[in-house]
Image (tube, rainbow, N blue to C red):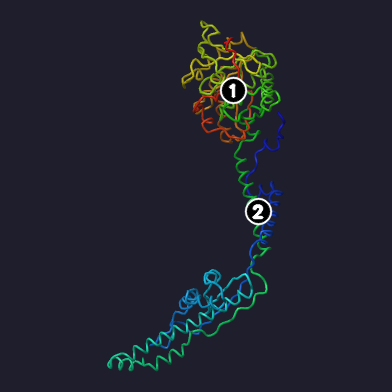
Amino acid sequence: MPDVPLDSTSERTRSGVLATVRTHATAIAIGLVAGAVVGYVGSQFLPTEYTATSTIFFEANGPFSPDQGGGGDDAVRFVANQAALVLTTDVLQPAADAVAVPIDDVRESVTAVAGTDTSDVTITAVAPAAEQAQAIADAVANSYRTVAGQRVTAEADAAVAAVTDAPGGAAAAAAADGATASAIRLRAAAYGDGVSAIEPAILPETASAPLPLQNALIGGLIGLFLVTGVNLLRDQRKAGTASVADLDLMLGAPLLSRYPAPGSRAISDLVNADSNSDRFRAANDVLTAIDVRLEGIRRPSVLFLSWQNHLSTTALTVSVSLAAAREGRPVVLVDGGGKERGISSLTDVSPGRGLEGLANLATPISASLRTWRVAKAELGVVPLSDWSPTPTSAAARPQVLRAAMERLRESSVLNLVDGPPLTERSLGLALGRGVDGVVLVLDEDTSVDDAQEMGRRIGIAGISAIGYVLVRAPRRRLRESDRSGGRGESAYESDMVVEEDRARA
């Protein structure tokens, strides 16, 4: 298997904005430049817009009143109301007719803002052409002034008519209060339209949009924050993932190899006998580590335990056994129980007496041991006594496994046990006391908390850990049921690439 540089996996990445900026400075700079370029280039495809403004200055500080001098004491509210009146159909329709632009376009392009410190309303118009923007702004201002004057005249006429048509006594009373027709006319003339002046719009010389430099700045900032944020999240995630150095320290064992996980539950995916594959080379690395660590032990036995994905553990166990068989070593695969998709269902051999029968000296070895031919290799298999293992199976009793391994030393050189997945009860670690060594199988994204928990359990169980194998996730992730703690939905998918020598079985 090709070596992986330790620089990216042996040390945990520091999390934090400054650490991310220092680590990914080049990528962040590229994101900044790319965002700026996209913003600048994208501006060239945006429609050109021009903005013109005209201002209405008010002389009155309140609405016209026929029986008063006009005005009021709430000028701020009055100006705010006039800003709202500017955007009504009564004002915009005449303006739209004057500039020959549809009223809907005028309504979308015009805004009116009341002054906060002064009695004025600023009208802003946006249009594709400078002349059109200027014309719309002026037309709306002039239309408002006309409509405002018409409203004053209409109110004065209504008040005069009310006084003229009133009965004699009411008319006399109104006259006594100064609400005569002539007085009302004088007040209306004095009020006028309430506007003191209109500042016409100036023809804009430059477009208000798009702004290439501004868009480039915004795009650059977006690229900067986006790339920084993505790398920050990745660094934080990686900081929570145990590195090789973390695992070495917490597990008290070295990394043996990296093993590509099977892409599916098909037997052809699980049993890969191709000597040129990464999985087979990883199996050779594990076999070499076993030979070195257990040197001097007569016909050793090794237990394979998974923390997350028990399917990968079964595949790795078979790969190591095939690597040993290629060297001419008699190998026996043992189903340690505790999970449904173990060696038993993978090999499709008939059930035997299992570990219980193998550990019993009164029971012949042949009652438990079966033969499996795969990829021109012959492997011994000790399947379960039935296909429904229970929590009280042999996985919980290391003494049974120890006695069974002693009997197998008579007929095999290497015994590999496909152990149960590690759960909160740690049955697999208990089973580890019945073999010469244990190989742990972990996902590459194992968290620091999980690594600490595994190290704690290993220390309590008192097992001899040969090392650990990191499983690389396949391109097509396994279903969640395959990653569960030892239980699945169904057996392995049928695949006839595996040949069983039924005659010899």
Q: Which mark is residue 304?
A: 1
Choose between 288 and 193: the one closer to the eye. Answer: 193
Choose between 468 and 84: the one closer to the eye. Answer: 84
Instruction: Report the amino acid beneath label 1.
Output: Phe
Q: Does residue 341 appear left or right of residue 11 in this picture?
A: left
Choose between 5 and 483: the one closer to the eye. Answer: 483
- Image: 377 above or below 486: above
- Image: 29 above or below 397: below
Residue at 28 percent of width and 93 percent of height: 168
Q: Give residue 27's position: percent from left, percent from top.
A: 69, 48
- Image: 254 above or below 129: above
Q: Give residue 299's position: percent from left, percent from top.
A: 64, 13
Query: Mark 2: which secondary structure?
Result: helix
Residue at 60 percent of width and 71 percent of height: 127
Query: Mark 1: which secondary structure?
Result: strand
- Image: 211 above or below 54: above
Instruction: Report the amino acid beneath label 2.
Output: Gly
Q: Are marks 1 and 2 in contact (CB under 8 Å)?
A: no
Quadrant containing the N terminus in the rendered view: top right
User: Between disc 1 and disc 2, whose residue precedes?
Assistant: 2
Count of marks overlaid on the render? 2
Q: Give residue 204's position: percent from left, percent from top.
A: 65, 75
Query: Badge 2 local density, few (<14 within 10 Å), some, or many (20+)?
Result: many
- For label 2, the residue is 223
Residue at 34 percent of width and 90 percent of height: 163
Q: Give residue 383's position: percent from left, percent from top.
A: 54, 16
Q: CA distance from mark 1 to mark 2?
A: 47 Å
